[in-house]
């Protein structure tokens, strides 16, 4: 097994910041994972599992342990009963490449998740979602390896404990599990999901193909997200807050245009993008080399090489929201 030392993590994350990993290795098999586990035990260091680094903020101090970059490949599609397409996908596969392929093949389900950066293995962790679809809607099971104990397990959808941008794999216990294969249930039957407002218009012009949906999603995203090759970003930096419905009602009384979404009879999700933009006036706000994107305030952009600058902006934004609305907001991005 090839272990590198003092590898800069800035090059492995889309925010393009972060100090070095003391040790770094790429794994593509269970045997590799077991070797990585033994190495970390021997050196008595913690392990950090990395996919394509599109939802992580690594601090300037880096990581004083072993970073394991997961590159399990493979795409296997089997047509089952009732037009189901059982899709077994290696966790290191690039999500958007899989989306493009399933659109080509006519396997419905993933088209709304077009152009999201990141790997397949990252999708269950934060229950990736966009334009009316969450990965939990399609997921059948997750195969994983416990990096602490060496155990292998297949998690059912229920065992993944999905919620909005949440799963078992985000908990301290769940973090021990390295996802190796994600099995999705797609369909050869047409199943357009057009609830999101920018997609609803598609159905007015008649039958909607998967390619139509993919093209529309890509068009919408190109207006809301910066060019990942040019600036550092991790998509939405914060989660949309979920609050008790009476708190949402009180905010609505003050800000009638605030977009809200019912989660349950007790809870309501609020658009933080709107709050940052229209209530806090922070869309396009910039300090030094870090700011909130001019077309979508929930997206943090950075050309800085220092995570401390990003963290300073995050604190400023969090304090502003607290002061203006009383809300305590949470990061969607994980800080290491
Ligand atoms: N809005 C503003 N100003 C802004 C940004 C948004 O007024 O600067 C308003 C919009 O007009 C809209 C509402 O806020 O009415 C919601 O905005 P948008 O549809 O862009 O979605 P979002 O809630 O900001 C979420 C996800 C995105 C996902 C989109 C589309 C989270 C944290 N983010 O963003 O996911 O692509 O919906 O479904 O839930 C990600 O998680 O990294 C991500 C990009």
Image (cartoon, grey):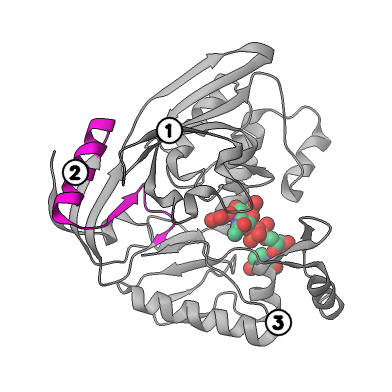
* Above or below, 88 relative to 296: above
Please tell me whether mark 1 sits on a helix, a strand or a loop: strand
Name the front one of labels 3 and 1. 1
* Image coordinates for residue 221, horizontal then vertical, percent: 58, 51
Residue name at image x 45 percent, y 45 percent = 122
Mark 2: few, some, or many residues within 10 Å (few <14, many ≥20)?
some
Q: Secondary structure at mark 2?
A: helix
Which portion, as a residue range, is magenta? 27-56
Where is residue 24? Give x, y as percent. 20, 51
Q: Which residue is mark 2?
A: 38
Of marks 2 and 1, which one's residue comes earlier in the chain?
2
Q: Residue at x 60, y 23 (%)?
A: 107
Numbered badge on residue 26:
none
Residue 269 on the magenta span: no
| Mark number, residue 325 | 3
Q: Viewer-nearest of labels 3 and 2?
A: 2
Disc 3 to disc 1, how far (Cα)? 43 Å
Residue 115: x and y in percent read 52, 44
Q: Is residue 306 left or right of residue 182?
A: left
Q: Which mark is residue 153?
A: 1
Q: Position of residue 53 (x, y in %)?
A: 37, 53
């Amino acid at each position: 097994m090839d272990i590198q030392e003092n590898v800069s993590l800035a090059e492995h994350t889309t925010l393009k910041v972060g100090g070095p990993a003391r040790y770094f290795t790429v794994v593509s098999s269970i045997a590799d994972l077991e070797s990585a586990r033994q190495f970390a035990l021997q050196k008595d260091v913690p392990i950090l599992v990395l996919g394509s680094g599109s939802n992580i903020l690594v601090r300037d101090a880096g990581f004083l342990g072993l970073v394991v970059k997961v590159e399990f490949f493979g795409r296997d599609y089997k047509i089952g009963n009732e037009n189901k397409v059982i899709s077994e996908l290696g966790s290191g596969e690039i999500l958007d490449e899989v989306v493009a392929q399933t659109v080509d093949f006519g396997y419905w389900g993933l088209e709304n998740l077009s152009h999201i950066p990141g790997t397949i293995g990252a999708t269950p962790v934060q229950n990736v979602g966009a334009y009316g679809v969450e990965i939990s809607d399609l997921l059948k099971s997750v195969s994983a390896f416990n990096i602490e104990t060496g155990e292998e397990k297949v998690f059912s959808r229920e065992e993944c404990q999905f919620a909005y941008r949440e799963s078992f794999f985000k908990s301290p216990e769940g973090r021990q599990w390295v996802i190796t294969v994600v099995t999705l249930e797609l369909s050869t039957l047409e199943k357009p999901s057009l609830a999101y407002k920018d997609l609803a218009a598609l159905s007015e012009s008649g039958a909607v193909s998967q390619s139509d949906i993919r093209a529309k999603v890509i068009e919408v995203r190109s207006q809301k997200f910066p060019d990942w090759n040019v600036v550092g970003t991790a998509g939405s930096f914060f989660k949309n807050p979920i609050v008790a419905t009476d708190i949402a009602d009180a905010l609505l009384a003050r800000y009638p245009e605030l977009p809200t979404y019912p989660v349950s009879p007790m809870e309501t999700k609020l658009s933080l993008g709107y709050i940052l933009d229209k209530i806090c006036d922070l869309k396009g706000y910039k300090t030094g080399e870090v700011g909130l994107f001019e077309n979508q305030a929930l997206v943090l952009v950075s050309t800085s090489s220092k995570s401390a600058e990003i963290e300073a902006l995050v604190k400023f934004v969090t304090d502003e929201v607290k002061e203006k609305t009383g809300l305590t907001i949470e990061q969607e991005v994980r800080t290491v």
